[in-house]
Image (spheres, helix red, strand yellow):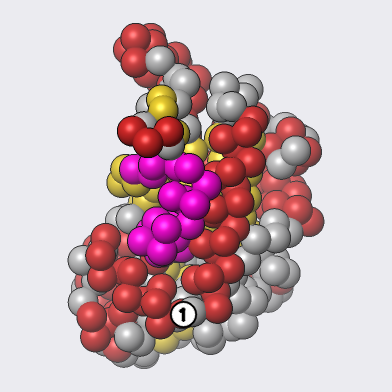
Amino acid sequence: MRRPFTVLAVALLLAAQAACGSEEEPAAGGKDKVNAGVIAIVDTAPIHLGKAKGFFDKQNIDLTITPVQGGAASISGAVSGQFQFAFANTTSLLTAVEQGLDVKVVTNGVASTGVPGKDFSAVLVKPDSPVKTAKDLAGKKVSVNQLKNIGDTTIRAAVRDAGGDPDGIEFVELAFPDAPAALENGQVDAIWVVEPFVSQALSRGARPVTWNFAEPVEDLTVAMYFTTGKTDPDLVKRFTAAMNESLTYAQEHPEEAREALKTYTKIAPEVIAEIYLPKWGTEINEESVQEIADLAQGDGVLKGEVDVNTLIP
């Protein structure tokens, strides 16, 4: 996830890449070449595992997985035609819809486990911090990896639910890998991180005060795979089938998902063995997507109402 993009930025990308075309190309052997823009994080283990298992080959798809830095890059890449499919978090996709971009969700990407203490996202403080609950985050300096996105939206919701006032929180943009050290040296009062940085910080003595994906929004759909209206409907159907098989397999074979992490991330094997895995299922909880949209609108992240049905046909 990176800083929010603009329609102008996407327009420039479109102009620069127009010559590349947007249609998928048949590969040797009659398979469709597909380039998917995917963030190299724990959340995306299923697509890597599915490729290795041949689930995309079975659907006559020759899949290339291109690492991207965040949702803004995956969305601009999809809209410009660089990617036929991509992965982005719920807030980034809602922002794209608000900006009038042609994005359509094809399947779930990742969801919270819904279990505080056993989820892949948390807000952490130093062990001797006076912050004991989410309510105590009011007036504190809290790091997020991107301002005005799913992190600060869910943290504000958690603080409200605990009886605190989130308006006084000072959010500081800080990359996840840098957050544990920033907490230790007192640069911030609390950090929001996802795995593997949750486990890393906990191993250094950090203490959780809220599990911001598991607590404020029930059964939260955190991110989804999407395409644009330019993609051939039959290819969308086949990609979705392969992706759903990948999600189901990863959920049912967590140890194989952990092994897949070793192929595309730099997470140490001993950390991979201990991290909390997210929930990978094929179902999108549209109510949770709508709740994130409502929260983001209330916080001023979205300027107006967004029709979730536009994003999730």
Judge whether 308 appears above or below 142 on screen. Answer: above
Predominant secondary structure in magenta?
helix
Label 1, secondary structure: give it: helix
Judge whether 252 appears above or below 74 on screen. Answer: below
The image position of residue 261, as x and y in percent, is 32, 69
Q: Is residue 271 magenta?
A: no
Q: Nearer the viewer, residue 245 or 257?
A: 245
Q: How many marks?
A: 1
The image position of residue 225, as x and y in percent, is 55, 47
Judge whether 160 appears above or below 39 on screen. Answer: below
Quadrant (top left/top right/bottom left/bottom right) for the C terminus: top right
Q: Nearer the viewer, residue 221 or 181?
A: 221
| Residue drawn at point x = 46 percent, y = 80 percent | 254
Q: Nearer the viewer, residue 75 or 136?
A: 75
The image position of residue 62, as x and y in percent, is 39, 42
| Residue drawn at point x = 62 percent, y = 82 percent | 115
The image position of residue 91, as x and y in percent, is 58, 46
| Residue drawn at point x = 57 percent, y = 22 percent | 230
Residue type, numbered disc 1? Pro
Q: Is residue 59 magenta?
A: yes
Q: Would you name the residue on which mark 1 appears?
A: 254
Judge whether 130 appears above or below 17 on screen. Answer: below
Q: Nearer the viewer, residue 260 or 266?
A: 260
Looking at the rendering, the stretch of residues picked out in magenta corresponds to 43-64
Q: Is residue 73 visible?
A: no
Q: Is residue 247 visible?
A: yes
Residue 68 relative to residue 148: left or right: left
**Residue 96 lies in what quarter of the image?**
top right
| Residue drawn at point x = 45 percent, y = 42 percent | 61
Residue 39 relative to residue 122: left or right: left
